[in-house]
Every structure is written in structure tokens, then in C-alpha cells.
């Protein structure tokens, strides 16, 4: 039975590696941020949340058939702006999830929220619905910078929201964007220290990237937006690592920092190449039963997704069985983002072509990676050039 | 179709600069004499190959036999040989011109005499042609026929008072051209009863007919089933067919003196037929061969390599097929550490090189890398031997060389006065010696002696660019002269890149070296370590640049578990990697080679 069919299937022992989580996408925002290329939509009139809940419920039921029975270790409400959802909406979706997949006793249930005063008022409601972790899109601790980033909150408002969140939820994280136009390392170090002083156990620190189709891209190509060059961005990166490590929040992933034990469990599912259900408009999933790993993608447009779910019971546009070499590539791409690195034995089991020892050795000579037994890790010098390191290993 | 009385034959060619309307005029002549029906006329009938039509140039000589009823009531046979207009094919042009008695000199009435016009018309004069000047495009608002007539008289020294003003495009006055061919050009001479003497004008390979040989009968008669002998090569063949092109192929019983037509026979390869050779009858040979025969010699060389190493055998097959039709192009296998397996190819000139490369890419769907063009250097060795070298990779140890000689050309450049300064500077920069500088109205004509190796290296592109396309250029190879030439190597991260090494004049080495290093710095992507790029003469580094190690790239946020997007990026990188060549630790993209070799300075 093994033979050729094996080539397109997932090794049985990989189904539990990396864990299982559920991602829910809420695709609406009050305004589109100029740097953001995520699947977000601005609507004149608020969406009919009850209708969406019904659709989420149907899609969850459909997706359950694709994953088989599993216990979910995490749920993540991403967006868009999930904090525009009514707490009842969140509660109803969580109920539907629990019906499909039992939640682990210590399941992490995260909701992304904007730190405006309006949204902060709903925090207690989310807590009551079962949310135990929030990730706040603070982005900057400078009012002029917040305005430039198109954010609708002030620093003061954001810090109040962080404090409130800390009192309401077990765990709180927030995002900052660095390598912003004109940002210098000294200012960033100060801003970062202030962020750490808020007492959160987790921070996501993203370098500003210019993404296709965004307002920033238009400005950038017109020469009206100047972002730091590579040397400058490197200096900012170095400061980021120094300050966070000194304060006990070292990087555990290329852009994510946590006190040991406070890592985002849901995101670890992606990075450890586990399985995840992707629910809602424009959501991605990695699902599988009977040894296959499939990639699912749903309709991005919220109204079209709604119509499709109401007609077909799900919004999935493509469901691709991943070949084993593709699975191996995905595992490597995600796993090398983590400081813990990847297990090359698992890479080989998934069907990846062996990485030439000479390639690893060349990178090790430059101090960019380390190989200990079967575990391949990117070293601190390698992370700022991770794309190039991965290409040098796997392309 | 029957044979024409000798007095009613007129053989002619059309001499013109590129774009001055030669092919369009030929089309009109064919149309007006009814050589093809309306339906069969496609634009520029004589330029058969796509590439000829697109570039507006003629690569192979073509012939067409027209039947024309003149005003005197007699019917004449007019044989037109359409010649290649470009300097690379100068020898083919000279043989085509030797096969006819007269020429139409076509000059664009809005542009005037150009460098190529001159080169070709002097050849026609050398071949004792009677010449009818024709001013084309007189319908254009910019046309200045009187000025151009004066120019023809001043520059070429031809009487232009009875030049015919035409528009080949609209058909205006084409009838006058036909009448002038009959009244102003002579009938061919030649003795019907003498032994066969025919000039081999051109030959090509046809899938159905095999090798087709284009001939001009000087004396005697060429018949089907005759056994003929090529006097240059000594080879003997049986003739299967003789005939003419109207331009449709028409088989005839025989061809008599003054006629131009074709033969096919037991000839296996185009390479067996040499343009300019004399054809005679084996059992009754003519006493003396025609003068002026010389085999075609490649003068420009370069390596051609497949971008995808797997295409090597396809490239070999494609070259073999092209050579069936073009014996002047040569190739032999070459191995390069940089580019893998490929071929060292010889060409008649730069245009010939470009045409072959383009045909390989287009007709055979191959992606190619061409190395820097090189010329043939003569090395006189200490031990008394001489070596012809056309690949810098074959450079012998310098201590064994007594002297290196390089080919020189005499170039004629015509340019509007405005660009003269830049043109002179370009020629000086390329080690040129000015021979002459004269004016024709607002146009300057400069004659320079230049080393060919400076010309094969983007000279023509530069000339066109500094003159906004107005300067025209023609050359012929004159002699070999001693030169202080050195081999410049390019090292990337300490590894020599053979495909980029070149022979340069010592005075130009540093400039070239610096330009090459700067260019490569732009073209080679950053790596995870510093990469020195050096230009060196032997062990001496004359230029150096460093590509700094990559300091930062951005691993963007992975939105909602969208790993597919990342994987597709990796797949793209894998594809990209296939187009890279590995040099030690450094990966150099194919485009870097192509762009570096196209370098301008």
C-alpha cells in the first residue's frame, strides 16, 4: 500500500506534530491603514453580524469534516478588526467551534483588537465570551507617527487600553511597527523601553514593509515615502534585539518576543507546521484526515463569501492536496522563523530533498546557522537576513 | 518560357543604403511586369526570411527574372539580383555585382547619400557598371531632390542630371525606371559557342530541391544532365535541373550567355559551393576561371552558450541546420567554466553575428548567452611559429609571445555636422587614426583607421546613440598591425570568470577594467558575505569593487497562516536559481553576463 501513493500524503506521525488551532477572520475595518495588505474591507453600513454568525457556523461544520475529530489548543480571531465584533458574535462563534472541536482545558483564545476607547469598552464582554488573550494593534508610541500610520487612536488612548486589557485578560500582547520613515535607533530604543514598561509578557515587533497594492506603495514608488535603507534598518533591528533581550523578552520568532513560556501558542501552530482550520473570508487552512495535508483558501470578499457559504455551506475556493516536497518546504519556511529551529529528520520524513551539507556548512561558516544533531537553527546573525538564508538553504 | 535573345537581356542590381527603399522598389518592378499576381504579392517579396523583413535588410542574394514589353515594342528579359546591403556581406555583394552589367542607385531623396550607399556604389563602379540614379521617396514633404542630385554628383562623381524621381511606395514613375533599364543599361556580352563559363553567385539549401545554386552564365550554355565542374574546389556534379525565378521557380531546358538562373544537382552541402567560384563543363572546360574568387573568412568570433545547459544538443542541431544554408558561419565546441558547454562561432561581422544569434533564438526557440565578440589576433611566438587566436581563453603564456598583431579597418562615417565632435571623440577613444575629413553640405564624411577589436565592442551602438541614429557607418578590413595587447581577467571572489576575460589594448585596460567591475557590482546580487570583484592583468589587479554582504532583508508577517504565499516565493527563487551560474561561493545571474558583455563606456 505504501508505494507511490505515499508521495502525496502526510506521514501519519506528522498529523499531531505542531498541534491544531482554529483561525477566524473578521474582514472589516473602520478605515484601511496605508501599510496594510491584509484582507480588510471598509463598509458604509455595519455588517449584519447575526447573518455572519450563521455563516461562520456553517463553514465550521463543513471544515470539521475536513479535519476529522481534533482537540483545538488555540483559537485566534484575526482581521480586519475583530474588536468591531459584538461580544455576542464572538461568543456564538466560539460556541460553534466548541461543538466542532473540543477545546483543550488550557486553550489559548486570542482576539486582535484596536486600542481605541470604544473598543476597550467591549473587553469585558470578550472575556465573558471566553477570550483569554488579546493582541493590540498599538503600532507606535508617538502621536505624529500614529497619524502617519493611519491609526485612529492616540498614545494615551492606547496605553489606557493596554492597562485595561491587562486587568481583564490573562495574557496581553501588542504590536509595534519599526523602521518607520525617519526613525533613528535612539528614539526607537526609548519607544521600545516604554512599551516593555507596560508590563506585557509578549510583543510583536514588525519591520515596516511596503506591500503591493497599499497606499504606502503608491507613495513609495512616487518617491514621497522614504523608508530606512538596509544599513539603517539593520541598526534598528540590532537595537530591537538588544533592548528586548535585556528586559527579559527575547525573540522566539523573527518578529515575536516573549517571556519564556508566554509565546503565542496559536502562532506556534503555524510556525511548527501544525494543522489549522481557516474560517471566514480570505482565511487559509492546513487541514487533513487519512494522512493527507490540504491547503484551503476561502473567498476574500466578505459579501461574496457570505453568499457562497449560504449557497454551498462553505466559502472555500481552493482545496489543494500538498505534495510531500511542498509540505517539507512549508515546514522549513515556517520553522526557521523560530529560534528553536527545525528538525531535519521531520523534514526528511515529510519528503523534502535533503539539504546539501555544503550549503549548511557555508552558512555555518558565516555564523548564520548552526546544526546540532538533526536540529537546524538560525543564529542571531542569520535572522536579519532570514530570507536570504532560507533561499541559500532551500532554493 | 523560352530563351531570350541576348540583345534583349538586361541584368541589373539595386544599390542602396538600408531603409532607402531597395526592397520596395524591387516589389514594384515585379508587380508592374506581372511576375506575381496581386494575390501572391506579399510585401517585400524578395526578403524571404522573417528576420529580413523585420530588419528591412537582405541577407541572402535573391534573383528575379522579369518580362517587360518596352516602348520600342520588343519584349525584354530583366534579371534583378537583390544584393545584401550590409558591410558584413561585402564579398557576397561584390559577387552579385560582378554578375550584372548595371545598377540602379537608389537614394532616399529626404536623407541623401549614406556611408553604405558609398561603399556599395563604389563596388558597382569597380565592376564597370552603368548606373541609373533613382531618387526615392520624392513624395515626402522632406524630400530635396535637387540637393540630393548635387550630392550624388559631388560625393560620388556620377552625372545625376537624368536621375529618375520616384516613389516606390506609391508606384510613381516606376514605368520610367523600367524603360531606363532597357535604354540606359547594356545588353550582356558572351559567346554562346564557347565552353561553359558561369559565375556562382550564391547558393542555399531548400528542403525540397536540396542545394540550389544561383548562377550567371558568362559564355556557353548550361543544360540539364550536364556534368559540371567547380573550378575553385575541383568538385564535379551532375546537373538535375536548370531554371529561373520569376520569382516563382520555373524549370528551363537550358540557360544561355547573359542569363541568370539556378541549377540543382548532386551537391550535398552548401559548404561545397563557394560564392565567386567558376562553373564549367567537365568534358569541355573553359580555359580561364573568372577573377576575384576568394573563400569567405569569418572575422568576428564569440562563444554562444545555451542558458539552460540541457539545450546544448538542441543548439548543436540548430547550428548544423543554419550552416546548411550559410557556409560563412563556422562553429566548434567550446567549454567554459562560467557558461558550461557551448560553441565558439565565427561570423563575417557583427550584423552576421546578431542575425545568427537571433535566428537561433527565434527559429529554434533557444535562449542563448553570447560572450564578448573577439577578432582574430596573430601571435608571433619567440620560437618562430605563428598562432591565430580568436578566443582570449586560448591566450598563450605571454613570455612565449614575441608580438601580437590585430586587424585594422578603414571606416567611413557620415554624420550630420552637429554630431561630428562626438563622433570624432568616439573614434579617438577607440584608438582611431583620422585619415580624412570632408564636408558634403551639412554632412561630414570622416575616414578613420580603427582596430577592429574596438569596433566589435559596441562601437556601432555607441555611434548610433551619440548621433541620435543619424550617423552611418561602413568599413573594410585593411591589414594587421602590431598592438600592445594584454589579456584582462575578471575575478569574482578570487575566482577567474573565463567568459568575461578579453584582450584589450594596454592603454584601454584600466578604463575597461573599471567599467566592467562597476557594472558587475550592479549586476551581481548581494550575498551573505562580501564579494570582491577585480580586473587583473596577469597577477596585477588594475580595478577593484566590493559587493557588500547583505545586511538586512525583511521577513514579512505571515498573515493568517498563509504559508502558500511564502512557498510560492521559494518556488520562484528555485526557478531563479536555475538561471544562476555558480562561481565558487558566488551565484551570478545569467543576465549579469549578458548585460556585462553589452557594456557601454
Image (cartoon, rainbow, N blue to C red):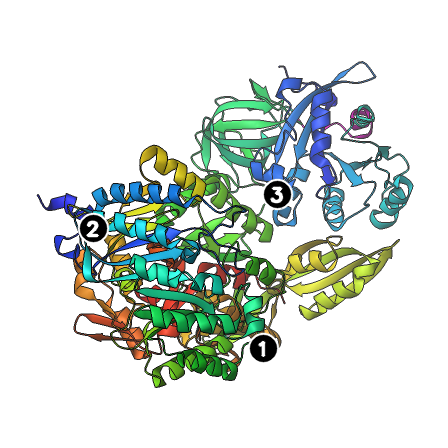
- Residue linked to disc 2: A101
Is there a contact, CB below 8 Å, between mark 3 and mark 2? no
Report if residue A89 lies within the magenta region.
no
- Residue linked to disc 1: B510
Q: Is residue B131 above or below residue B523?
A: above
x%, y% of residue A32? Answer: 52, 56
Q: Is residue A119 above or below residue B544?
A: above
The C terminus of chain A sits in image quarter: bottom left
**Closer to the eye: label 2 or 1:** 2
Q: Which residues are magenta?
A: B178-191
Q: Quadrant of residue A64?
A: top left
What residue is shown at x 80% (from left), y 31% (from top)? B167
Report if residue B179 lies within the magenta region.
yes
The N terminus of chain A sits in image quarter: top left
Residue extending farthest to the left is A1
Residue count near mark 3 (Cα–Cα under 10 Å), binned few <14, some 14–19, many ≥20: many
**Marks 2, 1 in one chain:** no
**Closer to the eye: label 3 or 2:** 2
- Residue linked to disc 3: B92
Disc 2/disc 1 C-alpha distance (Å): 72 Å
Q: Quadrant of residue A181?
A: bottom right
What residue is shown at x 39% (from left), y 61% (from top)? A112
**Marks 1, 3 in one chain:** yes
Say which element carries label 2: loop
Residue count near mark 2 (Cα–Cα under 10 Å), binned few <14, some 14–19, many ≥20: many
Task: For residue B46, say whether it is visible.
Answer: yes
Say which element carries label 1: helix
Say which element carries label 3: helix
Left or right? Give the position of B50 relative to B432. left
Amino acid at each position: 500500500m505504501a508505494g507511490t501513493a505515499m508521495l502525496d500524503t502526510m506521514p501519519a506521525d506528522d498529523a499531531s506534530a505542531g498541534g491544531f488551532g482554529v483561525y477566524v477572520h473578521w474582514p472589516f475595518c473602520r478605515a484601511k491603514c496605508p501599510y496594510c495588505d491584509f484582507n480588510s474591507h471598509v463598509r458604509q453600513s455595519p455588517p449584519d453580524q447575526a447573518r455572519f454568525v450563521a455563516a461562520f457556523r456553517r463553514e465550521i461544520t463543513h471544515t470539521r469534516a475536513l479535519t476529522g475529530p481534533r482537540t483545538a489548543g488555540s483559537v485566534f480571531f484575526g482581521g480586519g478588526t475583530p474588536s468591531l465584533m459584538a461580544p455576542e458574535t464572538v461568543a456564538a462563534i466560539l460556541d460553534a467551534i466548541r461543538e466542532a472541536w473540543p477545546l483543550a482545558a488550557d486553550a489559548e483564545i486570542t482576539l486582535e483588537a484596536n486600542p481605541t476607547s470604544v473598543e476597550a469598552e467591549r473587553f469585558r464582554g470578550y472575556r465573558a465570551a471566553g477570550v483569554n488573550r488579546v493582541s493590540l494593534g498599538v503600532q507606535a508610541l508617538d502621536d505624529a507617527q500614529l497619524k502617519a500610520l493611519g491609526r485612529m487612536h492616540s498614545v494615551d488612548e492606547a496605553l489606557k487600553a493596554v492597562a485595561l486589557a491587562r486587568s481583564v485578560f490573562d495574557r496581553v500582547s501588542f504590536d509595534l511597527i519599526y523602521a518607520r520613515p525617519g526613525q533613528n535607533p535612539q528614539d526607537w530604543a526609548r519607544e521600545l523601553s516604554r512599551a516593555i514598561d507596560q508590563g506585557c509578557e509578549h510583543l510583536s515587533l514588525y519591520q515596516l514593509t511596503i506591500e503591493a497594492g497599499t497606499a504606502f506603495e503608491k507613495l513609495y514608488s512616487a518617491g514621497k515615502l522614504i523608508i530606512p535603507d538596509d544599513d539603517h534598518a539593520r541598526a534598528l533591528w540590532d537595537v530591537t534585539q538588544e533592548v528586548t533581550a535585556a528586559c527579559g523578552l527575547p525573540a522566539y520568532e523573527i518578529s515575536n518576543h516573549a517571556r519564556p513560556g508566554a509565546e503565542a501558542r496559536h502562532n506556534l501552530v503555524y510556525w511548527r507546521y501544525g494543522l489549522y482550520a481557516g474560517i471566514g473570508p480570505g482565511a487559509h487552512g492546513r487541514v487533513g484526515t487519512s494522512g493527507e495535508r490540504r491547503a484551503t483558501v476561502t473567498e476574500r470578499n466578505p459579501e461574496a463569501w457570505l453568499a457562497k457559504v449560504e449557497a454551498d455551506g462553505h466559502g472555500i475556493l481552493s482545496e489543494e492536496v500538498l505534495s510531500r516536497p511542498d509540505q517539507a518546504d512549508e515546514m522549513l519556511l515556517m520553522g526557521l522563523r523560530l529560534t528553536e529551529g527545525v528538525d531535519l529528520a521531520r523534514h526528511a520524513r515529510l519528503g523534502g530533498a535533503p539539504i546539501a551539507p555544503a550549503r549548511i556548512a557555508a552558512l555555518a561558516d558565516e555564523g548564520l546557522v548552526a546544526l546540532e544533531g538533526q536540529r537546524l537553527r538560525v543564529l542571531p546573525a542569520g535572522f536579519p537576513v532570514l530570507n536570504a538564508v532560507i533561499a541559500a538553504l532551500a532554493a | 518560357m523560352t530563351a531570350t535573345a541576348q540583345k534583349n537581356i538586361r541584368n541589373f542590381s539595386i544599390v542602396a543604403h538600408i531603409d532607402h527603399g531597395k526592397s520596395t522598389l524591387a516589389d514594384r518592378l515585379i508587380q508592374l511586369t506581372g511576375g506575381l499576381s496581386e494575390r501572391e504579392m506579399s510585401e517585400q517579396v524578395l526578403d524571404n526570411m522573417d528576420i529580413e523583413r523585420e530588419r528591412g535588410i537582405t541577407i541572402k542574394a535573391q534573383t528575379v527574372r522579369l518580362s517587360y514589353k518596352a516602348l520600342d515594342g520588343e519584349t525584354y528579359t530583366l534579371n534583378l539580383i537583390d544584393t545584401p546591403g550590409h558591410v558584413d556581406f561585402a564579398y557576397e555583394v561584390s559577387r552579385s555585382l560582378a554578375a550584372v552589367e548595371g545598377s540602379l542607385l537608389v537614394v532616399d531623396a529626404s536623407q541623401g547619400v549614406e556611408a553604405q550607399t558609398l561603399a556599395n556604389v563604389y563596388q558597382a563602379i569597380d565592376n564597370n557598371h552603368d548606373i541609373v540614379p533613382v531618387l526615392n521617396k520624392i513624395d515626402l514633404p522632406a524630400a530635396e531632390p535637387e540637393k540630393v542630385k548635387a550630392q550624388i554628383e559631388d560625393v560620388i562623381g556620377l552625372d545625376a542630371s537624368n536621375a529618375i524621381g520616384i516613389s516606390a511606395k506609391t508606384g510613381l514613375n516606376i514605368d520610367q525606371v523600367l524603360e531606363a533599364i532597357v535604354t540606359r543599361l547594356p545588353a550582356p556580352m558572351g559567346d554562346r559557342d564557347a565552353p561553359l563559363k558561369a559565375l556562382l553567385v550564391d547558393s542555399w539549401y531548400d528542403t525540397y530541391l536540396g542545394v540550389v545554386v544561383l548562377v550567371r552564365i558568362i559564355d556557353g550554355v548550361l543544360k540539364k544532365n550536364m556534368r559540371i565542374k567547380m573550378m575553385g574546389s575541383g568538385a564535379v556534379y551532375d546537373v538535375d535541373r536548370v531554371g529561373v525565378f520569376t520569382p516563382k521557380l520555373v524549370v528551363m531546358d537550358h540557360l544561355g550567355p547573359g542569363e541568370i538562373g539556378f541549377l540543382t544537382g548532386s551537391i550535398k552541402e552548401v559548404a561545397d559551393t563557394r560564392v565567386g567560384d567558376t562553373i564549367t563543363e567537365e568534358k569541355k572546360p573553359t580555359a580561364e576561371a573568372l577573377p576575384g574568387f576568394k573563400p569567405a573568412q569569418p572575422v568576428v568570433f564569440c562563444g554562444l552558450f545555451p542558458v539552460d545547459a540541457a539545450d546544448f544538443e538542441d543548439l548543436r542541431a540548430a547550428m548544423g541546420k543554419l550552416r546548411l544554408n550559410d557556409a560563412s558561419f563556422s562553429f566548434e565546441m567550446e567549454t567554459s567554466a562560467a557558461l558550461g558547454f557551448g560553441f565558439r562561432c565565427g561570423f563575417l561581422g557583427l550584423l552576421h553575428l546578431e542575425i545568427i544569434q537571433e535566428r537561433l533564438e527565434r527559429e529554434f526557440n533557444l535562449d542563448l548567452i553570447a560572450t564578448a565578440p573577439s577578432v582574430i589576433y596573430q601571435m608571433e611566438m619567440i620560437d618562430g611559429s605563428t598562432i591565430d587566436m580568436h578566443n582570449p581563453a586560448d591566450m598563450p603564456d605571454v613570455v612565449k609571445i614575441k608580438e601580437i598583431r590585430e586587424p585594422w579597418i578603414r571606416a567611413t562615417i557620415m554624420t550630420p555636422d552637429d554630431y561630428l565632435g562626438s563622433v570624432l571623440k568616439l573614434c579617438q577613444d577607440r584608438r582611431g587614426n583620422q585619415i580624412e575629413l570632408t564636408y558634403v553640405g551639412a554632412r561630414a564624411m570622416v575616414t578613420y583607421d580603427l582596430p577592429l577589436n574596438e569596433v566589435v565592442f559596441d562601437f556601432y551602438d555607441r555611434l548610433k546613440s551619440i548621433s541620435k541614429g543619424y550617423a552611418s557607418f561602413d568599413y573594410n578590413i585593411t591589414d594587421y598591425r602590431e598592438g600592445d595587447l594584454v589579456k584582462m581577467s575578471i575575478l569574482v571572489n578570487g575566482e577567474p570568470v573565463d567568459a568575461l576575460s578579453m584582450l584589450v589594448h594596454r592603454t584601454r585596460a584600466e578604463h575597461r577594467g573599471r567599467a566592467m567591475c562597476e557594472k558587475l557590482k550592479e549586476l551581481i546580487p548581494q550575498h551573505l558575505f562580501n564579494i570582491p570583484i577585480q580586473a587583473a592583468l596577469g597577477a596585477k589587479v588594475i580595478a577593484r569593487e566590493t559587493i557588500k554582504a547583505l545586511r538586512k532583508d525583511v521577513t514579512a508577517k505571515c498573515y493568517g497562516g498563509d504559508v502558500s504565499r511564502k512557498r510560492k516565493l521559494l518556488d520562484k527563487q528555485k526557478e531563479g536559481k536555475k538561471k544562476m551560474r555558480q562561481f565558487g561561493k558566488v551565484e551570478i545571474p545569467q543576465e549579469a553576463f549578458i548585460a556585462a558583455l553589452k557594456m557601454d563606456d
